[in-house]
Image (spheres, rainbow, N blue to C red):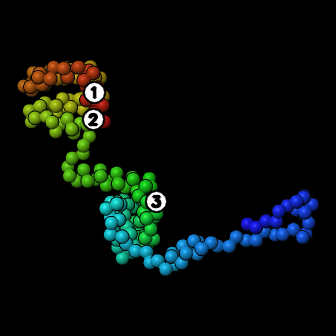
Amino acid sequence: MNYKKQTSISSFFSETAEVPEKKKKTESQDQKKKYEDKRVRGWVSTWPMKFPGLVNTDRGMVCTFCRQFPALAGDTVMVTGCKSYRVESLCGHFSSQTHMRCVKAAAVQKRIEAGRCAGPLDQIVNKLGEHHYSLVKKLFNTAYCVVVNEMPFTTFPNLLKLQIKNGSDLDQLISYQSDKACARCVSLIN
């Protein structure tokens, strides 16, 4: 802004003081406006690699993760179709919390459909052989029986002894025949 050099306070308040002129647009601002007016924004073929789950439809860009879980996605335009073909729009959506929740939900659903939810118990069971699997299954069923019938954990060793007496081979799991072992099994069940 062009200002008149102030020589005194009274010159500042006088009516003859020069009013600052408005700043004119610079050439770069004019060029940027012309560029934006002339530019036709459209789909860039490399975006799906940079933004997984992004597809282009006749209604605009759509996020497949958010479209799969509209209740989690909320009212984002990436569910219905976004016609604003800008990287800023994509970066904003793909870094949002709602999108992250939809991606996590899709990963969980994929594991469920594949038949394997990789929890700590599932990882252990996958490493067991068939014989050990049947032993652990009997152990967990007994612990479950204790919890469902609201029995004290101290009855767990006696129930295992009864199963051994009836012909079960649970005697191979000696270290798991205590009330504390029952508590550990129950914590893994829940």
Q: In the rendered structure, which amino acid carries the disc numbered 2?
A: Ile
Q: Which mark is residue 32?
A: none
The residue that disc 3 covers is 92
Q: Is residue 19 visible?
A: yes
Residue 32 image offset from top left, x and y in percent: 54, 73
| Crowd class of label 3 (few under 14; some 14 to 19; many from 20; radius 10 Å) | few
Which residue occupies the extreme bottom position in the image? 38
- In the foreground, 145 or 131: 131
Q: Quadrant of the C terminus?
A: top left
Q: Is residue 74 visible?
A: no
Q: Secondary structure at mark 3?
A: helix
Residue on which disc 2 sits: 189
Would you identify the image quadrant in which residue 64 lies? bottom left
Do labels 2 and 1 touch, CB within 8 Å?
no
Identify the mark nearer the N-term, 2 or 1.
1
Quadrant of residue 2 in the image?
bottom right
Mark 3 or mark 2: name the one nearer the start of the chain: 3
State which quadrant residue 93 falls in.
bottom left
Identified at 90% across, 70% down, the residue is 16
Residue type of the residue flagged with mark 3? Gly
> What residue sits right under mark 1 in the picture?
184
